[in-house]
Amino acid sequence: MSARVLAGPPTAEALLRDAAQRAGRLPAVPHLAIVRVGEDPASVSYVRGKARKAGEVGLRSTVHVLPETASQAELLALIAALNTDDDVNGLLVQLPLPAHIAEAAVLHAIDPRKDVDGFHPLNVGELWAGRPSLTPCTPAGILFLLRHHAIPLSGTRAVIVGRSSLVGRPLAALLLEADATVTVAHSRTRDLGSVTRAADLLVVAVGQPGLITPDMVKPGATVIDVGINRVVDAQGKGHLVGDVHPDVAGVAGALTPVPGGVGPLTVAQLLANTVHAAELQAA
Ligand code: GUN
């Protein structure tokens, strides 16, 4: 048996179609402001991808770039200006930030109603209080993927491997909202396999190539691989691989590929969140 493939791109297209329709009912085209500090190559590439996708679905976006040497005060001043600009609906600061800038201070400074990343403590708290509003893009995109493919959640055992504030923690809150029984495993978990083998839904977000092997997966389980790891083969050629070993396809009931799985959903969800932010502001 080979697992059903849960492909990201067509699912992301469905999410984007829905967001574009909702945008069409708003008084103005939603506008996303993206702030990048410095020239980290991955951040440059991610920000370019976000702005390009915004344009493709008919949203407005502007990218604000500060030099690597910009002070925290300069970044906070830019955020304050974008917070009060009524023309801006969504605002995100690309992470990671240079080491001299305190990430928590920056995330606190973003207007929670424009916080399309869902990283502001108010939005984090509302999510854990059972009142999700703007929620982090990768976890929210995963929920969309699961629902789009009619994967049952209520009453099922969900195991998340990884406790990051970008993925593992907010996903735990969203799966609880969906009435799953949620376990969060991490680097200190003893006998990881005994935990993951209990999962009807297994989500892996740790950044360790091939961590999850077939013996760690319950036959028929749904496996979501959030890892995107660059590895170099014996010929010196680079490849992107996930946290889940490819042989898991022989055990799982459904599996997201890497690349072409969760990745495209993150950007699609960001644009859906931008439309949601504009809806909140229009209400
Ligand atoms: N860096 C890596 N992922 C993300 C994300 O989802 N949002 C932001 N702002 N920065 C990131």
Image (cartoon, helix red, strand yellow):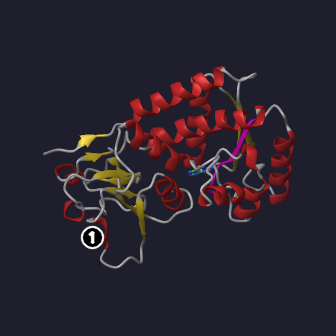
Give the answer, above or below, for where 40 lies relative to 216.
above
In the rendered image, which quarter contains the N terminus? top left
Residue drawn 21% across the image and 52% down it: 220
Q: Where's residue 10, x and y in %?
A: 39, 30
Residue drawn 46% across the image and 55% down it: 175
Q: Where's residue 26, x and y in %?
A: 71, 24
Looking at the picture, which amino acid does disc 1 mark? Gly
Image quarter for residue 88? Answer: top right
Q: Secondary structure at mark 1?
A: helix
Q: Is residue 32 visible?
A: no
The verdict on residue 124 being magenta is no
Of 196 and 212, the residue lying toward us = 196
Where does label 1 land, which residue? Answer: 193
User: What range is drawn magenta here?
Assistant: 89-96
Of 224 and 102, the residue lying toward us = 224
> Would residue 247 be found to the left or right of residue 269 on screen?
left
